[in-house]
Structure formats: structure tokens, C-alpha cells
Amino acid sequence: MPPVLIFIFLLLPGAVQAGAKNRNWAENPVGFATARKHIYKMYHERGWHRSFYCDCQFNPATHAAAPYSCGFRDPKFAADPTRPFSALAEVVQMEHVVPASVFGPRGLSLNTSFATCQDKKNRRGCYERVSKEFKRMHSNPYNLVPVLGALNNYRQDLVMGPVEGETKGFGECDFEVDRNHKRVEPRPQVRGDVARIYFYMEKTYPEAPIIDPNMRYFYKLWSQQDPVDRAECLRAAEIEARTGMVNGVIQADCKQLVGGK
């Protein structure tokens, strides 16, 4: 085990024990439903109660969110000050930073088994059954982050990238949606995290079209402007402790960051 992870685990009492029973996700992926459950459990046990895009408070045990805590507003209700958001804003969902659509038929087009999945209500569940490759990508915990359900609904499978104009239609939550260019832009404090998740997924699954060539420059820029921090390293260490999966993209930075303290 790398020294940096030993050091981080000392900061996270019980992390190794909590994950000791299930440390082979890379070889035996658990599926999205189980991965989502484990990520919520991880956030609950570690006391992490802030959503990824808006930094809203939420309860990992109940998935209830507090959109008022981050000043979130829904542009659909801009004309009604008594109803600033929908019910979806009051729940947290696990979002795929790299959209799951790139793991399916559009991305892994050589997998003809996808054609057998015709049930629109549970198509991704079927993809997991017919393709271990899809199941592995779909349930990768490094790609899953807690977000307000309303933002998950707005984002859908739009690509992460720069949005011009700074419309900021979600109140104090700096999250922008540009449907004309099919992009969304998160707040500056997590853009580097987003970029490194894209780089990690690309490195881990080179067979899938993870990164749009037009976005690569911006992801490199985001990663430089918002470098790896301690919170990102702690999250990676937790995931590794529980699943056995290593994030090689940030491993060296975490070693330097933690080792320097």
C-alpha cells in the first residue's frame, strides 16, 4: 500500500475495516444500484453532507436535501417567489459526472448485446446484465457524486464544458446549462474535480469515447485552475479502502499534498 494512503487511512478511522469485506469492484463490479447505496453509506459514515455542484446540505441517510442552504432556485419558478424550486430540489441523487450514455450503445457500439435491451423503463439495468464492461463503468464510484435531483434532471447527459454568458439561472448555485451547445458548466471550485474524473474514466476505460476532443483543452485548464485538494484525496482514499479501486490520476498529487503536511 502506498505510504500516502496509509497516512490518509489514519485520518479516517474505520475506513479499512468498513471496506474490507468488498475490495474487488474492479474485477467484480457491483452494479449501479449497489454502488449508489455504498456511496451514500460512505458519506453518512464520514459525515460528509454537502452536495457536489451547489454545496447544499443534505442527509446521506434519507437523501433529503436543503436547497435553501445554498441559495438554490429553479429557473422554472422564477416568476413565483413563494415556490423557488420543485420537489426534485429537495432530494439528492447520485449523478454520473461522465454521462452514462457514453457507456451504452452510443459509446460501446461493438457490443451487439445491447440490441436485446428494449425495456425503456430499465434499459440500463439490462445493459448491466448483458455487458460486464458497461456494468463496470456504470457503477464506478469515482464517477458518482451527490447532486440535487433538480440539477441532475437539468443536466441529463450534457457534456461538461465552458458556457459563455454567465447566465446563473439557479440562484446562488453557480451551475450553468447551455442546451444550444449541449454543455453544462459547474462552479469553479469543482471544475478541476470534474476534469480529473473525466481523465480518470478515460484512463480506466480507453475503449469508450469518454472525452470530447473539443473539451480536452478546457479540462486541462480546469484541472490547473482548480488543483487537487485534501478533500479530493480523502474521498479517493475512502473509495479505495472500500472498493479496492485506485485513482491513478490523482495518486501522485495526493502523495505530494499529504506528504507535505
Image (cartoon, rainbow, N blue to C red):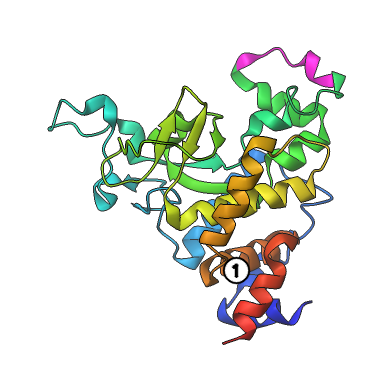
Magenta highlight range? 113-120
Q: Disc 1 marks which residue?
A: 233
Judge whether 109 appears above or below 6 on screen: above
**Residue 132 in sight:** yes
Q: Which type of secondary structure does the marked residue at label 1 adopt?
A: helix
Q: Estimate the x, y position of residue 143 in percent, counting from the top left.
A: 62, 47
Q: Estimate the x, y position of residue 249 in percent, counting from the top left.
A: 71, 60
Extreme residue toward the bottom, this view:
261
Look at the magenta stretch and give its main secondary structure: helix
Give the residue drawn at x 44%, y 29%.
178
**Residue 212 in sight:** no
Q: Estimate the x, y position of residue 124 in percent, counting from the top left.
A: 67, 26
Judge whether 152 appears above or below 145 on screen: above
Q: Is residue 204 left or right of residue 211?
A: right
Judge whether 117 appears above or below 155 on screen: above
Give the residue drawn at x 75%, y 22%.
105
Amino acid bearing label 1: Cys
Is 119 within the magenta?
A: yes
